[in-house]
Image (cartoon, grey):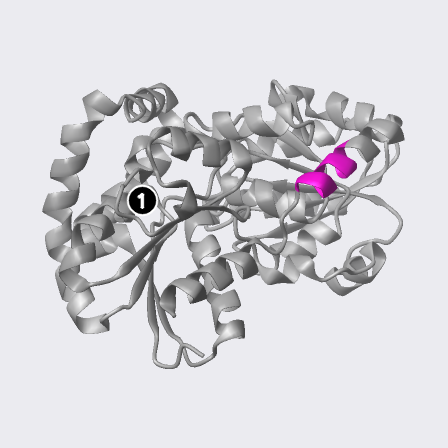
């Protein structure tokens, strides 16, 4: 089935969630048909090497130091009239640099997991006779995703499907799959079995602290606040590609791991990781996730039935993701990082509330999203 098919994934290194979603779908696709040839490309770098560096680093610096400016431009993107001409000109200019890739790889189908390359692919669609699939990796949609000639939209929930329908997208071209996560999330394992594999202490409340693949957010402040938690805990910290943050957190961990406990802190152990490819293990081993609500991280937590404490969401899509998770009662918000310990104590002191968060995650999770996405893609390729 599908012998000789070629599928190109266009992602973007603005954080790592978009690429992780592409990788999840790619893996699921190859499980269906191992003869399919696939390739994942960072669309920012493909457009222009300098643009790639500026876009990736610029995004990180902007959301870290000037979040109000990023928020302004993100919200501007929601004004169709204001952004229509800009979107058209931007995609026409950058599309030139993708023609070489198209000619060399000769894809039958292009999967976009970021809004930026979806516009480029929509322009090149007829020229190169490709099918176009858009995988929306947040719980919100903005105009850069909207292209009337896309063959298929894969979205996280029914609300997003309604938004697309309101934008005159053919309902037959919209499928609710969930945001694609690694197929490993579908595998059930006992919590203590995973903890043993990771070198974590068994039968101890475990908190996972993440800042996305870029290691953003007040992770240092969160760890500082967790020292005041009234329950014995162990903490797993993931710093992503942020090497400076990892070094700082390892120093803090060394002090906490070597400290005499008692009144000083309830933290019994801290483990620090950089960029990881086993988020499924870390989430399965944990009782609570403290994070900014990136689309993929949030979907992974739901797949792992892991309650979420949201801290300082980035402007734009993450604020909307936070609204979605809180509205659906799958997460709670710590309005300030110094309040994290109080929120954690409230949850651990109220097993019913923690159980409700887990139950909502169980109801909302779509751990087989990548597999469903792969099946829809294969149908298009027939």
**Whole-percent x and y of residue 253?**
67, 45
Residue in the picture at 36% in, 49% down: 13
Residue 49 in percent (x, y) is at 19, 54
Residue 243 coordinates in the image, percent (x, y): 47, 49
Q: Does residue 55 appear anywhere in the picture?
A: yes
Secondary structure mainly formed by the magenta segment: helix
Which image quarter is the C terminus in?
bottom left
Name the residue that disc number 1 marks.
Answer: 56
Relative horizontal placement of residue 290, taking residue 277 as reference (left or right): right
Which quadrant holds residue 144?
Answer: top left
What quarter of the picture does the N terminus occupy?
bottom left
- Horizontal side of residue 229 vs 140, given as left or right: right
Is 103 in the magenta? no
Instruction: Pinpoint residue 206: horizontal percent, then vertical percent.
Output: 78, 44
Q: Which residues are magenta?
A: 357-364
Q: At 48% from the left edge and 68% from the top edge, which residue is drawn?
A: 29
Identify the secondary structure beneath mark 1.
helix
Q: Is residue 306 visible?
A: no
Q: Nearer the viewer, residue 27 or 248?
A: 27
Question: Is 142 located above or below residue 1 in the figure?
Answer: above
């Amino acid at each position: 089935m599908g012998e000789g098919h070629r599928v190109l994934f266009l992602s973007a290194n603005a954080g790592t969630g978009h690429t992780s979603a592409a990788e999840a779908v790619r893996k699921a696709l190859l499980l269906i048909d191992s003869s399919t040839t696939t390739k994942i490309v960072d669309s920012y770098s493909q457009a222009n090497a300098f643009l790639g560096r500026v876009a990736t680093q610029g995004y990180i610096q902007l959301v870290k130091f000037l979040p109000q400016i990023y928020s302004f431009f993100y919200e501007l993107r929601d004004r169709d009239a204001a952004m229509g001409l800009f979107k058209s000109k931007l995609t026409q200019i950058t599309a030139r640099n993708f023609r070489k890739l198209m000619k060399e790889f000769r894809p039958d189908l292009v999967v976009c997991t970021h809004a930026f390359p979806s516009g480029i692919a929509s322009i090149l669609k007829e020229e190169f006779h490709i099918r176009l699939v858009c995988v929306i990796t947040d719980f919100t949609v903005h105009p850069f995703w909207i292209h009337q000639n896309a063959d298929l939209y894969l979205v996280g929930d029914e609300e997003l499907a309604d938004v697309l329908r309101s934008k005159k997208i053919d309902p037959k071209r919209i499928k609710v799959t969930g945001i694609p996560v690694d197929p490993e999330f579908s595998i059930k394992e006992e919590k203590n079995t995973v903890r043993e594999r990771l070198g974590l202490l068994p039968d101890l409340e475990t908190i996972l602290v993440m800042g996305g693949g870029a290691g953003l957010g007040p992770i240092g402040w969160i760890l500082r606040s967790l020292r005041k938690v009234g329950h014995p805990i162990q903490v797993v910290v993931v710093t992503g590609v942020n090497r400076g943050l990892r070094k700082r957190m390892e120093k803090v961990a060394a002090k906490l791991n070597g400290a005499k406990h008692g009144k000083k802190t309830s933290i019994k152990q801290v483990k620090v990781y950089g960029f990881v490819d086993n988020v499924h293990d870390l989430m399965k081993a944990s009782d609570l996730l403290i994070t900014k609500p990136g689309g993929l991280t949030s979907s992974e937590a739901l797949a792992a039935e892991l309650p979420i404490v949201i801290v300082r969401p980035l402007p734009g899509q993450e604020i909307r993701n936070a609204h979605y998770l809180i509205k659906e009662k799958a997460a709670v918000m710590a309005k300030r990082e110094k309040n994290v310990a109080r929120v954690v104590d409230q949850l651990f002191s109220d097993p019913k509330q923690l159980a409700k968060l887990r139950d909502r995650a169980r109801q909302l999770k779509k751990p087989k999203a990548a597999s469903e996405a792969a099946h829809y893609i294969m149908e298009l390729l027939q």
